Image (spheres, rainbow, N blue to C red):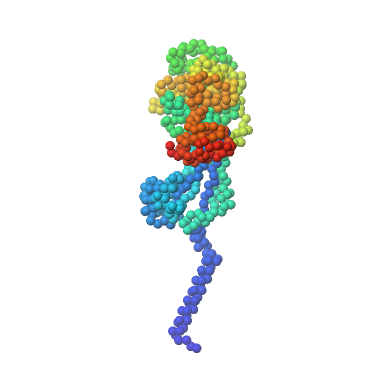
């Protein structure tokens, strides 16, 4: 049969369509079954992603296992801008719920991205307010394109206590200051990036559970600090700073045998209170270095009964006059022991010139001045002393004898006195108890015990007959040394006649544990001498230390009254505080609650910040061993 021309055309078109349809069918099959790499890549980009999984950050505890940090679960709001509608309206709603301007949220919502953070770490009450502003329905479902992500937020249950040591973390829970920074590699664990499948809105929907579990949690860090003593020390420091209208101050309590720091408090009304001034800031130590000069003299064969000429109150060195701190002090011949007792500047200068710059400089270096302590805390400075005796002309040597013309840190001074207390060993200060690298350290002996005993004899004269009388604690034999150092005025580049740093450093003899205590007040007003400022602060700190470690005190009636008024001695609970009933915690701070719980066989669970708003069980409930007490904190 012969086809007409028209039929032939129709047949060709039909065959062509069939071939095209078959080709399309084959192509579709290839794409669906065999997978086109380009299409596969597009698919993966739309429905697969990489998610960074951050493990739980390790905790920081004190030496007794008390938590100094906690990880709180909070929520953060995220969105997929490509899935959002009515963005102007949403921006207005976000501004009402979260604060800020609607324009800043609209800018975020208009980004050409599949994931953005709207706001990180939102308070629970703010999340609840989403319902009010139509961002969330009554069932708790957010507007399409938004979702909440659970995150961890670092909190410090003791408030500001020890914060210059503890430091802080970033919004991504990475250490940025203090121990949080120093120990960050251990605390943060090992974050990992894993593959996740996204849903239609770009949210991670499925992740490999085994891979998530492989994210190693951070290590816990145990400090040498005693949280109770730390709080007590900070209270004493704050009261002294306020009383003497000082710009700030510092206190250190260190175990003289092991180098463990039991308390380290700093306060500043000028600079950041989060800066660790005892490690990061230097000062001229004043007369607290005179016992180091005495150690150098003893090594040269001098005796405590040997005398130096006091010059009747002044002496000339290289055309400059050196005088006593008090104009009425006009000493003639005085023994080395008396020189320390009365803190004679002229006597110290005479002794330094007699024994020579080389001997004095060597002893300063033996005691660790001019070098970092090796503790490893971020920001520690080495201080400055001359590198060699050639750099010390007579005038500088004379002033270095009473602690000027050199720069030290408070930590260096307390370590030097610890060596005097422990028989001559230069310990390495330590803040971390589970740092195995410190356990095998053999501390070098820098002077012989017979020399330390003679120095202690002179320091006892300071506290019993000299400038350190107000450092005494009834029932304890206190030895130590005052230091009132001048401060260089940054404008005139000369020593100020109105600004001073007052310090006292010492310890109790014949009691355990062997602890060295350092106190300092910066720029106290009025009677600025250490004898009237830092020495009384030392006494209060030493009472707290004695109470904490059951040292034998003999307090008079008035001192007992003061001790009982201290918040750590008698917490201000408004409810019954017995061993079988739960007290009323409402209105108390987290510090007071944690102090009450210390030593009790109970489990504490705290949420929020501020003071106690709710508690469970209620006041008066029976308290059994292992009971769980839940505390909700809120704004005062």
Q: Quadrant of residue 634?
A: top left
Report whether 506 appears left or right of 488: right
Residue displayed at 57% across by 17% down: 457
Q: Quadrant of residue 254?
A: top right
Check the image and report above or below for 389 versus 182: above
Residue displayed at 49% across by 35% down: 584
Camera-nearest residue between 499 and 555: 555
Residue displayed at 47% across by 79% down: 14
Camera-nearest residue between 325 and 632: 632
| Residue placed furthest toward the bottom | 1
Report whether 86 appears left or right of 474: left
Residue 303 locus on image (x, y percent)? 58, 15
How many numbered discs?
Answer: 0
Residue 402 locus on image (x, y percent)? 49, 20
Q: Quadrant of the C terminus?
A: top left
Check the image and report above or below for 103 versus 382: below
Residue 105 locus on image (x, y percent)? 39, 50
Specify whether residue 222 is in view.
no
Residue displayed at 46% across by 35% down: 587
Specify whether residue 118 is in view.
yes
Residue 260 locus on image (x, y percent)? 57, 30
């Amino acid at each position: 049969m012969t086809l007409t021309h028209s039929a032939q055309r129709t047949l060709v078109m039909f065959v062509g369509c069939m071939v095209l349809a078959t080709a399309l069918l084959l192509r579709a099959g290839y794409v669906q079954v065999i997978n086109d790499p380009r299409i596969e890549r597009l698919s993966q980009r739309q429905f697969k992603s990489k998610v960074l999984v951050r493990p739980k950050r390790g905790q920081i505890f004190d030496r007794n296992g008390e938590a100094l940090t906690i990880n709180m679960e909070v929520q953060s709001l995220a969105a997929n801008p490509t899935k959002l509608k009515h963005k102007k309206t949403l921006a207005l709603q976000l501004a009402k719920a979260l604060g800020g301007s609607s324009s800043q949220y609209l800018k975020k919502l208009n980004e050409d991205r599949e994931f953005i953070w709207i706001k990180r770490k939102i308070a629970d009450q703010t999340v609840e307010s989403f319902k009010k502003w139509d961002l969330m329905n009554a069932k708790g479902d957010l507007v399409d394109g938004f979702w909440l992500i659970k995150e961890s937020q670092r909190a410090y249950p003791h408030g500001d206590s020890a914060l210059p040591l503890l430091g802080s973390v970033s919004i991504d829970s990475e250490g940025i200051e203090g121990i949080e920074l120093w120990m960050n590699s251990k605390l943060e664990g090992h974050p990992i990036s894993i593959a996740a499948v996204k849903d239609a809105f770009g949210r991670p929907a499925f992740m490999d559970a085994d891979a998530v579990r492989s994210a190693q949690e951070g290590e816990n860090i145990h400090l040498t600090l005693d949280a109770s003593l730390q709080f007590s020390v900070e209270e004493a420091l704050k009261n002294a700073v306020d009383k003497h209208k000082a710009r700030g101050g510092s206190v250190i309590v260190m175990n003289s045998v092991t180098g463990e720091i039991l308390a380290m408090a700093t306060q500043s009304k000028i600079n950041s209170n989060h800066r660790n001034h005892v490690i990061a800031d230097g000062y001229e130590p004043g007369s607290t270095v005179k016992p180091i000069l005495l150690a150098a003299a003893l090594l040269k064969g001098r005796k405590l009964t040997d005398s130096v000429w006091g010059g009747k109150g002044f002496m000339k060195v290289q055309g400059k006059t050196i005088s006593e701190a008090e104009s009425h002090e006009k000493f003639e011949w005085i023994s080395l022991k008396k020189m320390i007792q009365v803190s004679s500047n002229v006597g110290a200068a005479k002794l330094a010139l007699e024994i020579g710059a080389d001997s004095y400089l060597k002893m300063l270096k033996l005691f660790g001045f001019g070098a970092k302590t090796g503790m490893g805390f971020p920001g520690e400075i080495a201080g400055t002393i001359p590198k060699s005796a050639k750099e010390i002309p007579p005038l500088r040597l004379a002033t270095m004898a009473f602690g000027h013309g050199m720069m030290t840190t408070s930590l260096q001074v307390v370590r030097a006195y610890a060596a005097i207390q422990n028989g001559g060993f230069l310990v390495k200060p330590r803040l971390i108890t589970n740092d195995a690298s410190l356990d095998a350290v053999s501390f070098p002996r820098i002077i012989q015990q017979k020399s330390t005993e003679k120095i202690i004899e002179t320091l006892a004269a300071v506290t019993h007959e000299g400038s350190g009388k107000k450092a005494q604690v009834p029932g304890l034999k206190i030895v130590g040394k005052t230091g009132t150092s001048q401060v260089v005025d940054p404008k005139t580049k000369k020593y100020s006649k109105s600004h001073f740093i007052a310090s006292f450093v010492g310890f109790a003899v014949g009691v355990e544990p062997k602890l060295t205590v350092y106190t300092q007040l910066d720029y106290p007003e009025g009677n600025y001498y250490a004898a009237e400022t830092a020495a009384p602060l030392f006494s209060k700190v030493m009472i707290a230390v004695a109470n904490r470690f059951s040292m034998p005190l003999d307090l008079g009636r008035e001192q007992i009254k003061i001790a009982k008024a201290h918040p750590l001695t008698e917490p201000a609970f408004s409810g019954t505080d017995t061993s079988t009933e739960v007290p009323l915690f409402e209105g108390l701070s987290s510090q007071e609650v944690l102090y009450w719980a210390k030593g009790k066989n109970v489990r504490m669970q705290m949420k929020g910040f501020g003071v106690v708003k709710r508690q469970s069980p209620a006041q008066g409930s029976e308290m059994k061993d292992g009971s769980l007490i839940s505390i909700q904190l809120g704004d005062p």
